[in-house]
Image (cartoon, rainbow, N blue to C red):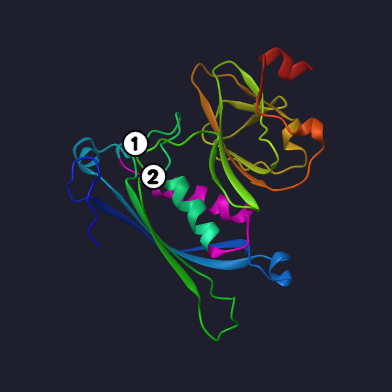
Amino acid sequence: MRVHSQIDGRCLDEIRLQDMRVRCTIGVYPDEAARTQALSLNIALYLDTRQAARDGQLHSTVDYAALARELTFILNHGRFRLLESAAEALASYMLSPPAADQTRAPIQAVELEILKPEALRGMAIPSLNIFRQEAPDAMVEPLIFAAPEAALLRFQIPPQGALRLRYPDWHLKALLPAESGLTCDGRELAAGEELCQEDLEQSFFANKMDTLRTVLAVATREVKPRAQRLGVQPVTVAQSLYN
């Protein structure tokens, strides 16, 4: 498929991830809500790779190993009723502007096919194929995408600062720091380390670096006490580590 840039009209280059296998809790039936299912993904990323060809630097293109890890994280921890919601969440993430601590070429369009091979017990393999092109409006962080049952967020933690990560009416289920330099309640976090625990909203995330750090989050729609229905609350590093 030929896709043209909305910026300069040139034909975009294409990077493909074929037959990516992921497990996800997905479906509208009660038995599907209680287990994970295998999904198969075929992904086409449309971008300009000329700068990467000239300078030979990974940050001038897309690190597809890192991207595959991030998409796997979203589906492993997400809870989606429909393939449509899962696909839109992934497309929204791939088309979102690169995080401040993740240098990469912007993805200008994405084609995504999701297959659900276990759904019909061998009678057929249902699938969904979507195409999305970069929207002219910039994403408003921290919310990247929300369905009625699940949301995808990206929090920014300022240099030498700390935050409790919260978003109104959503319960944080899992977190993924983009780079090293963060601590959770004083414990060092590695880049790409998945963090899953109860009451993530009560933890302090401190940034020891002199540059901004970001955290990708998967959230579910759960009723929380009124006192916890708050936005992100900045505090000082000293407060986050000792209070």
Q: Which residues are magenta?
A: 61-83
Tell me which corner region of the image, top left, top right, bottom left or bottom right, holds residue 35.
bottom right
State the count of labels. Answer: 2
Q: Residues within 10 Å of mark 1 (few under 14, many from 20)?
A: some
Question: Of helix, strand and loop, which one carries label 1?
Answer: helix
Q: Which residue is mark 1?
A: 59
* Residue drawn 72% across the image and 36% down it: 200
Query: Between residues 199 and 168, which one lies in front from this camera angle?
Result: 168
Marks 2 & 1, CB-CB < 8 Å contact: yes
Tell me which corner region of the image, top left, top right, bottom left or bottom right, holds residue 129.
bottom left
Give percent across and percent down for residue 103: 38, 33
Q: Amino acid at mark 2?
A: Asp
Give percent across and percent down for residue 56: 25, 38
* Residue drawn 68% across the image and 36% down it: 168
Q: Quadrant of the C terminus?
A: top right
Question: Of helix, strand and loop, which one carries label 2?
Answer: loop
* Residue drawn 79% across the image and 40% down it: 224
How far separated are the C-alphas under marks 2 and 1? 7 Å
Query: Between residues 45 and 187, which one lies in front from this camera angle?
Result: 45
Q: Quadrant of the N terminus?
A: bottom left
In the image, is 1 to the left or to the right of 33? left
Q: Amino acid at mark 1?
A: His
- In the depicted structure, whether residue 138 falls above or below residue 48: above
Q: Main secondary structure of the magenta part?
A: helix
- In the depicted structure, whether residue 146 falls above or below residue 125: above
Q: Which residue is mark 2?
A: 63
Tell me which corner region of the image, top left, top right, bottom left or bottom right, holds residue 138.
top left
